Image: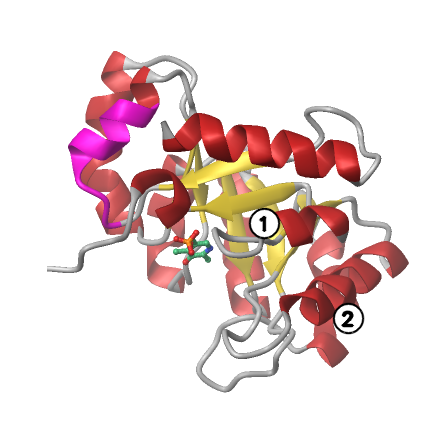
């Protein structure tokens, strides 16, 4: 089964990198996948999932949560400020904090609710105009700003440009995290998660390699 293959490839990559067993979290990215594929992965005992849309997650996870204990949900897609409340209510971690306005909204919600999901700041390492994320040159200042708001910033996240060598982007993200004293690195997908582990990923986001190709309606 694909899940156990990916988990064992991940374990091997972690060992090859000389890192501690279990030090990298496998997020199974279930966006767009039909419910029976998601259910099969739940049935194998996996509990950590990634979705990229709040609405899609709301549409299906409450049913699964009613039947399976210990599900942990990560938001890995861009978040509109007007969906922030629904997002903090639904997700255990949000990987796409990328601008002051959203940080302000999270801070307000954290104050009101007394709790906040773990946060990763998305960095647009390839400086692609169509992609979300703060620019690398602005990352230090934005990290400091988010911390001043007492937000639980656990690390950084990136999505390398498809046509470029991912390693350069993983290395850049790791460098920004290190100089800011952040441990978490959300990087690596189906095609390159083993490489990301080499560069220090703590969270890999793997979709199609676990569930099969996504079929968009
Ligand atoms: C879809 C998606 C993934 C998973 O991509 P695969 O190539 O299917 O593993 C990972 N991260 C983000 C941000 C995504 O949107």
Q: Position of residue 48 (x, y in %)?
A: 45, 30
* Residue 145 sits in quarter: bottom right
Residue under pointer 2: 141
Specify the segment rendered in magenta. 32-41
Vertical relation: 129 (above or below) 25: below
Determine the secondary structure under disc 1.
Answer: helix
Q: Residue furthest bottom?
A: 129
Q: Residue at x 72, y 71 (%)?
A: 168
Vertical relation: 104 (above or below) 152: below
Residue 200 visible somewhere in the drawing: no
Cβ at disc 1 under 8 Å from ligand 1 = yes
Determine the secondary structure under disc 2.
Answer: helix
- Quadrant in the picture for the C terminus: bottom left
Marks 2 and 1: CB-CB under 8 Å?
Answer: no
Residue 135 visible somewhere in the drawing: yes
Q: Residue at x 17, y 60 (%)?
A: 216
| 2 or 1: tag closer to the N-terminus | 2
Front: mark 2 or 1: 1
Vertical relation: 153 (above or below) 180: above
Residue under pointer 1: 193
Instruction: Look at the image and say whether residue 34 sits in the magenta stretch.
Output: yes
- The Cα–Cα distance between marks 2 and 1, rounded to whole angstroms, is 28 Å
Q: Residue at x 36, y 53 (%)?
A: 52
Of residue 75 and residue 199, the one placed in the foreground of this image is 199
Question: Relative to 103, is 18 on the left or the right?
Answer: right
Of residue 120 and residue 12, the one placed in the foreground of this image is 12
Crowding at dot 2, Cα within 10 Å, few <14 / some 14-19 / many 20+, comes out as: few
Q: Position of residue 35 (x, y in %)?
A: 18, 34
């Amino acid at each position: 089964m694909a899940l156990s293959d990916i988990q064992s490839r991940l374990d091997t990559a972690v060992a090859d990198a000389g890192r501690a067993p279990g030090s990298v979290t496998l997020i199974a990215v279930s966006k767009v996948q039909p419910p029976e594929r998601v259910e099969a992965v739940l049935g194998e005992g996996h509990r950590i999932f990634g979705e990229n849309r709040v609405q899609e997650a709301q549409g299906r996870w409450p049913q699964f949560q009613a039947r399976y204990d210990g599900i942990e949900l990560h938001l890995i897609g861009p978040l509109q400020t007007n969906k922030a409340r629904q997002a903090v209510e639904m997700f255990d971690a949000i990987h796409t904090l990328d601008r002051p306005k959203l940080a302000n909204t999270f801070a307000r919600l954290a104050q009101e609710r007394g709790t906040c999901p773990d946060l990763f700041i998305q960095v647009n390492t390839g400086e692609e105009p169509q992609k979300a994320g703060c620019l690398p040159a602005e990352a230090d200042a934005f990290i400091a700003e988010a911390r001043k708001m007492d937000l639980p910033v656990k690390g950084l996240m990136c999505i390398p440009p498809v046509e470029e060598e991912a390693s350069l982007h993983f290395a850049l993200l790791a460098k920004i995290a290190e100089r800011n004293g952040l441990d978490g690195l959300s990087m690596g997908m189906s095609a390159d998660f083993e490489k990301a582990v080499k560069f220090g990923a703590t969270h890999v986001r793997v979709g199609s390699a676990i569930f099969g190709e996504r079929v968009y309606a």
